Image (cartoon, rainbow, N blue to C red):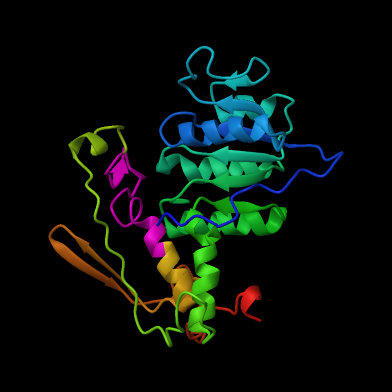
Amino acid sequence: MDTRSKNTTPAPVPSGTTPAKVALVGVHGFGAHHLENLQRLSAKGLVELVAVADPRPPAPGALPEKVTVHPDLDALLAASHHPDVIIVATPIQTHAPLALSVLASAANLYLEKPPVASMQDFLRLQQSARESGLGVQVGFQSLGSHALGALACLVDGKPSKELPAIGRVKSMSATGRWIRDRAYYKRSRWAGKRSIDGVDVVDGVATNPLAHAIATALHIAGARDATHLLSVDTDLPGQRHRRRRHLGDPHPHPRRPAHHLRPHPLCR
């Protein structure tokens, strides 16, 4: 999904506002996109990139001289940067421990998708976020799209000038039509792996390339937590596994029915 807002001009920074201090963990792979975007925002005075961390440092001259380069998150946190936000764009199997370390440091967290490799890790991260009171955002860009607000209006029976109301949504599906060749799965040691050295990775079509589509479909369906899911079916080589339970809920309670899209502010 590549939906652009009609208004792509960023809001002006209020006079006297101090730019948010941001650190980036992982400067290669998708981290390179974050790095490029942070440099763009820095040039506009919206953020201040204070440090990056990666065992493979960026190329010489790729960063302004004032940006400190660290070999890992521990070294970054041990320094006196005090970032407001830390972006984690690293291999999937490292997300959980790095995310927990970020929250323990009192910085807000932007975590690339998929957030973690297991429901257990997700619940730990969720609990840590609640206890810290800090912000946690996962990189599902489509959830910030204006298209979802417009769709909410259509589902709510409020047609737009361009489209009529579409009525009650009965089902949703997602189809990926791009190609992931062998080079894609050879780009890193963890790509396409279920685990490495006994550590869950769970990288695959549904958890990575189609993760955006799944998150968007769940949002449209009104699913906001695990109690809104009846079952999850996965097709694995040599087996078919069906799970029917409240995902991640150790104490079963009456299932809340999935609801429709919440009314968008523009539809009220």
Query: How many numbered discs sit on the rendered protein?
Result: 0
Farthest residue to the left: give it: 238
Please identify the dominant SS of the magenta region: loop
Q: Where 215 sits versus 135, above or below?
A: below
Q: Where 204 sits versus 242, above or below?
A: above
Q: Where 16 sits versus 126, above or below?
A: above
Q: Left or right? Give the position of 17 relative to 107.
A: right
* Nearer-the-camera pick, 174 or 182: 174
Q: Position of residue 162 (x, y in %)?
A: 47, 74
Q: Left or right? Give the position of 66 relative to 197.
A: right
Give the extent of the magenta segment. Answer: 191-214
Q: Position of residue 173 (x, y in %)?
A: 31, 71
Residue drawn at (34%, 56%), measured in percent from left and top? 210
Q: Left or right? Give the position of 17 relative to 262.
A: right
Q: Where 158 sits versus 146, above or below?
A: below
Magenta run includes residue 213: yes
Q: Position of residue 225 (x, y in %)?
A: 51, 71
Q: Position of residue 66 (x, y in %)?
A: 68, 18
Quadrant in which the N terminus appears: bottom left
Locate residue 17: give its quadrant. Answer: top right
Residue drawn at (72%, 28%), measured in percent from left and top? 81
Magenta run includes residue 119: no
